[in-house]
């Protein structure tokens, strides 16, 4: 064998002292890295999951009655507050008429509303109140009054170029004064 061939296979560790240092470094460097990593992670104050569970606000939220969560009760005997056409559109009609779902004419689409507007205001109101094709009666909201539906028809048709006048509620006659 030649000397050049011997040098190719020689190790970087040539003395027992170098061997001891390599073994020590092989154990100590990973241990030092792990200790430093643990120090880095644990030195910052972190709130644990659920640590705010014993605050007064969190306790009140847990023991609050379920019936209070998002339910609004209204007096059925109280006078009804009529909604405007825009309010009814946003709460009920927008789901179908903003995207054209099931053939519903989009609000503001002149071509889709032209033939409907040509049928007349009363026909449009009748279709909205009673339902037509895929559209349920009153847009699926039976709590709406006919006046609210008529206002909404005027609002939606006017967005497409009609000039319908939204109806005003009829003034109720004043109750006669009681005699004492």
Image: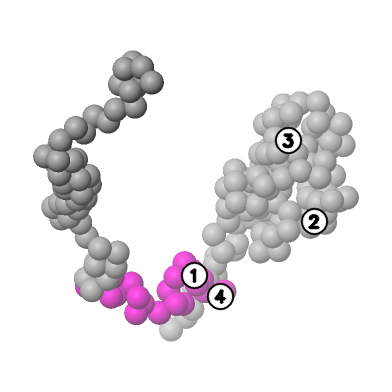
Cα distance, mark 3 to mark 2? 16 Å
Q: Residue at x 81, y 45 (%)?
A: 102
Mark 1, residue position: 71
Cα distance, mark 2 to mark 4? 27 Å
Mark 4, residue position: 77
Precedes in sequence: disc 2 or disc 4:
4
Against 83, residue 118 (above or below) is: above
Residue 10 locus on image (x, y percent): 29, 27
Question: Could you tell me if the residues under marks 3 and 2 are in contact, i.e. CB atoms within 8 Å?
Answer: no
Mark 2, residue position: 136
Against 157, residue 66 (above or below) is: below
Q: Residue at x 20, y 45 (%)?
A: 23
Q: Is residue 151 visible?
A: no
Query: What segment is highlighted magenta in the picture?
Result: 56-76
Q: Nearer the viewer, mark 2 or mark 4?
A: 2
Precedes in sequence: disc 1 or disc 4:
1
Asked if the stretch drawn in magenta spans residue 158, the answer is no
151 and 59: which one is in front? 59
Number of other residues with Cα within 10 Å of mark 2, as a class: few under 14, some 14 to 19, many 20 or more: some
Mark 3, residue position: 106
Asked if the stretch drawn in magenta spans residue 60, the answer is yes
Q: Residue at x 73, y 35 (%)?
A: 106
């Amino acid at each position: 064998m030649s000397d050049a061939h011997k040098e190719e296979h020689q190790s970087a560790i040539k003395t027992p002292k170098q061997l001891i240092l390599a073994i020590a470094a092989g154990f100590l460097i990973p241990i030092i890295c792990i200790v430093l990593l643990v120090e880095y992670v644990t030195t910052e104050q972190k709130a644990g999951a659920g640590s705010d569970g014993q605050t007064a606000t969190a306790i009140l939220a847990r023991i609050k009655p379920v019936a209070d969560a998002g339910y609004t009760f209204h007096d059925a005997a109280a006078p009804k507050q009529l909604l405007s056409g825009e309010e009814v559109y946003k709460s009920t009609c927008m789901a179908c008429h903003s995207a054209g779902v099931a053939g519903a004419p989009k609000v503001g689409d002149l071509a889709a509303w032209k033939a409907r507007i040509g049928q007349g205001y009363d026909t449009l109101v009748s279709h909205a109140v009673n339902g037509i094709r895929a559209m349920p009666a009153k847009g699926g909201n039976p709590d709406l009054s006919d006046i609210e539906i008529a206002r909404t028809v005027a609002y939606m048709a006017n967005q497409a170029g009609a000039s319908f006048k939204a109806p005003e509620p009829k003034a109720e006659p004043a109750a006669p004064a009681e005699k004492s």
